[in-house]
Amino acid sequence: MALSLRLPSPITASVASRRRPPPPLSRTNPNQKPSLQGTSSSGNAVLQCEHFQSCSGCSHEFALDRPSVLQEVSSFFEERGVQDFSFESGRLWGWRCRAKLAVRGSPDSPLIGLYQEGSHNVVDIPLCKAHHPNINAAVNLLKQGITTLNIKPYDEDSGFGELRYAQMAVTTHNTSLPLAERYLKGKVQVSLVWNSRNEQSQNAEKLNSLMEFLWKNGGPNNNTHLIHSIWVNFQTSSSNIIFGNRWRHFLGERDFWEHVGGIDISLDPSSFGQANTQAFDSLLRKLQKYVPYGSSVTDLYAGAGIIGLSIASIRKCRSVKCVEINKESKQSFEKSLSRLLKSVDGSISWHNTDASIEPLHWLEGSDVVVVDPPRKGLDPALVAALKAAACFSGKTSKSAQSSVLKVKEEKRPWILRARKAAVQMDSKTACDRSETWPQTLIYISCGWESFKEDCKSLLADKSWHLEKAHAFNFFPGTDSIEVLAVFKCGPRVAQKKKKGKKKTS
């Protein structure tokens, strides 16, 4: 699951009412991993973060390993025939490997953190328990640079100031380190959002000085090599949009790599990346098991194609089509594609278009469709298309064929242009085009309320039924939960009870 941000944004995250639970439980060891067995988490994990009362990032101080919505989620799936629902809660502290932080205050007292609930007052969070430790270290270094060089944090009321935001992203994929050390020694890609049009603007000298300070004190020549690279985004808009359209790479490695789902992936700072890298890897490993070997797969809301590429590599898919509306993800997809094993023998393509405009086109010819929509859920047109595809499945009737032809005749010109601009790696062996429709729908959800509505709609006329469901604790300390649901085409077939053998006298 980005890319528009899935789950609560680090800057505008909503906070549930902070009802005080019973007296604090015994302190939990931050390095101890909780049990991952089903829904049997202990519920004893305590946040113990000094920023909790004022910061909007976390809504729950207790039971980090058991989101309060978990019981509802479990019951929802059980009522719909899923008997083996599971829940995984991994790292509870230091899990966030990607954070967008506002920069406010003054040069002498900079504030780098999140907006207070319901306001644009920034709460400084230098000791955030959710952040990977090296994000906190990079923020501390940035503060030192602001004060030393008299960098003026942005002021929203006047529109003046130099540094507006900072995005910190940690890569834990350093093959020069032993596997056990890669997470804690991850390097930070620092992206500065600078209040100017470009690098030739009036305050460019101060920007260069700040980058040199960060690189000198956190780069590879320093005793503590903390910084992976430095990027700058130039933004002068008075709106609430964090990033502008102009990005520049200045120092360090150009490419940012991570290893999830069995493959290397590249992410530019403008691309969506999951904040909880380890939880996302667990989800991908689980998802792969539900894709039959040699399948033809369509990955909708694909972003940089991480899910599709992972499936293509691990399940040796015949074809994978990744469909994404954000054109900025194209470059990341191309780089990740270049690192796939040469043994991958399948057609892999990435298409920059809105799949909800012509959904049947993308569903036709696929055995499996994967959807990873934003928090608002699936577009109604796509839900309708999925239900129609289930009706077409296994049929070659003239009515089904004419329905598809009608949709094709109504193709919009901008969709056609988008297809021409697609990125594609052809298979070594030609794939026969067949009029097939998805038998499996894999739904990844970061918005529980929207998923419930989509799920009820898909099940209403028995065009699909639920086969499996799993949940993952992507955002410990919040009531958000990531769901992986597997649907199968058609109504559920009741299993016949095995007849016992008659005893012979």
Image (tube, rainbow, N blue to C red):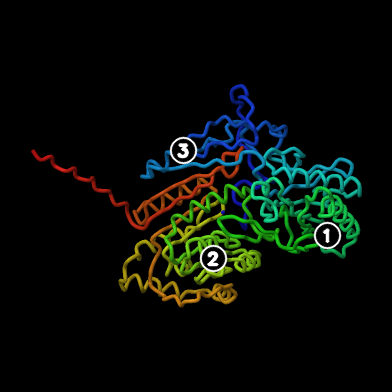
Which numbered circle lies on residue 322? Answer: 2
Give the residue at the far top of this rendering.
Answer: 23
The percent position of residue 66, horizontal first and vertical second, equals: 54, 35
Residue 263 occupies quadrant? bottom right
Q: Nearer the viewer, mark 2 or mark 1?
A: 2
Q: Is residue 9 above or below residue 46?
A: below
Which one is earlier in the sequence, the residue at label 1 or at label 3? 3
Residue 95 shown left or right of residue 489 in the figure? right
Residue hosting label 3:
72
Q: Label 2 vs label 1: CA separation?
A: 35 Å
Tag 3: amino acid: Glu
Cα separation, mark 3 vs mark 2, equals 32 Å
Q: Which quadrant of the rendered structure holds the C terminus? A: top left
Whole-percent x and y of residue 344? 52, 68
Tag 3's secondary structure? helix
Q: Is residue 461 above or below residue 40?
A: below
Marks 1 and 3 sit apart, C-alpha to C-alpha, by 48 Å
Foreground pick, 152 / 78: 78
Q: Nearer the viewer, mark 3 or mark 2?
A: 2
Q: Is residue 172 above or below residue 320?
A: above
**What residue does disc 1 label?**
196
Q: Quadrant of residue 23?
A: top right
| Whether label 1 touches label 3, CB < 8 Å | no
Quadrant where the N terminus is found in the figure: bottom right
